[in-house]
Image: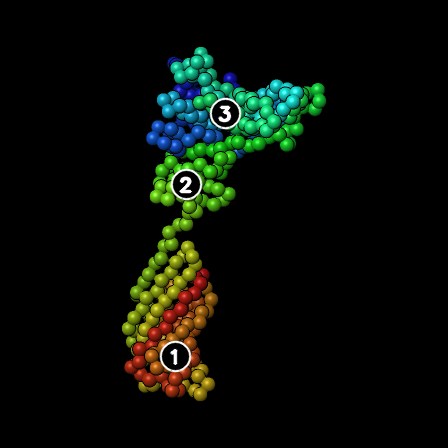
Amino acid sequence: MSVRSAWLLPLTQTREDTRLTPVGTFAPESEMRTRDGVIAGGNPFAATGAGAMSLQIGVGRALVQGTDAQGAYPVAVDVPETLTFTDGDAQFGRIDSVTLRVYDQLFDVNGQNLARLEIVEGPRQATPAAPALPAACLRLWDVAVPAGASAGVGGIDWNAALSDRRRFTSGYGGIIPQGWGASFNGAYDGQYRDVGGVLERWSATLGAWRPYRPPLAVETTTSGFSVAAGYTLSLFTARRNVAAGLGSFLVEVTRKGAQLNVPANGNIDDEAIGTLPSGYRPAIDAEVSACDGYGDGGARLAASGALTLRTWTGGGALANNRNIRMSATFFLP
């Protein structure tokens, strides 16, 4: 047996059928419908030219949805199967569809219980179109059959004739891989799909797919700053966003010693202010702005976390009992 289906043949489903077919809860399309499609993994149901008018379909697993009353049929093809196309029409081309089809005599008029690979022929017309499919029929490939095509005149050019129509499904809550028909709507708020490497989330409020951006986890601390001798700490807060790779801090200190006389050029010989806690330090030395309301200057935040005042302006002196505020944003290691 090359095509198997579980939950179809009364009292004859084998253990092997159950092991091979994808039995379980899959992505919904509505309250009672399952999103049918191919189960990703390898190259399921690969199509390979096997002759002038013959196409080989490889192994794979899928879910085939019937009517709402029927439900979905898990199907597996465990041996490659070759299908042969009828010759092309003398005047018009057509598009045939290679499908996985389930026959169930409880729901259709065909009088058999059967799952099989089947060619559904499209209409012969000046502008060929793929055929409409009956219930419980999953489209895998479309094949353009030119007018007059036959084995005697070269058959079908498989490199040009094949159009991949495999769409994918996944388990409930799983991410649906990109495939044919990526324009489908989501079935529930928070459903995910992968489109060309971009993860998208279905918004029921907007009725649209939106690129998924993970929440930015921002951590904040107000402790851990080791203030240098000669200063008292008035305020300290630091933040880091590891996902974005950014950190920032704000510190306010008060000078408690004598005023600091600043040379005429404004340069200070690295006046130590304190040290930021581990985890809230920059990847490389960062420039920091400083101000006490009367003058301002610049400081350096080293990768070690050491914060030092380096320049100052405004009167040529840094008086004591002034609240000096420093802040910066930087890249994390």
Instruction: Out of 207 and 331, give the one closest to the viewer.
Output: 207
Residue under the point 56% across and 23% down: 123
Residue 230 in the image: x percent, y percent? Answer: 32, 79
Tell me, for residue 296, which label it has, or none: 1
Compared to residue 106, the image places residue 260 above or below, namely below
Residue 312 in the image: x percent, y percent? Answer: 41, 81
| First of labels 2, 3 by sequence position | 3
Identify which amino acid the numbered label 3 is placed on: Ala
Look at the image and tell me in which quarter the C terminus lies: bottom left
Q: CA distance from mark 2 to mark 1?
A: 51 Å
Residue 245 in the image: x percent, y percent? Answer: 43, 59
Residue under numbered circle 2 = 192
Q: CA distance from mark 2 to mark 3?
A: 28 Å
Instruction: Out of 265 and 118, give the one closest to the viewer.
Output: 118
Q: Residues within 10 Å of mark 2 (few under 14, many from 20)?
A: many
Residue under numbered circle 3 = 132
Mark 3: secondary structure? loop
Q: Quadrant of residue 112?
A: top left
Which residue occupies the extreme right position in the image? 153
Compared to residue 290, the image places residue 68 above or below, namely above
Callout count: 3
Would you say the residues marked 2 and 3 are in contact, meaning their CB atoms lie under 8 Å apart?
A: no
Residue under the point 46% across and 38% down: 183
Q: Residues within 10 Å of mark 3 (few under 14, many from 20)?
A: few
Residue under the point 47% across and 27% down: 62
Identify which amino acid the numbered label 1 is placed on: Asp
Q: CA distance from mark 1 to mark 3?
A: 75 Å
Residue under the point 49% across and 24% down: 133
Which residue occupies the extreme top position in the image? 111
Q: Quadrant of residue 16?
A: top left
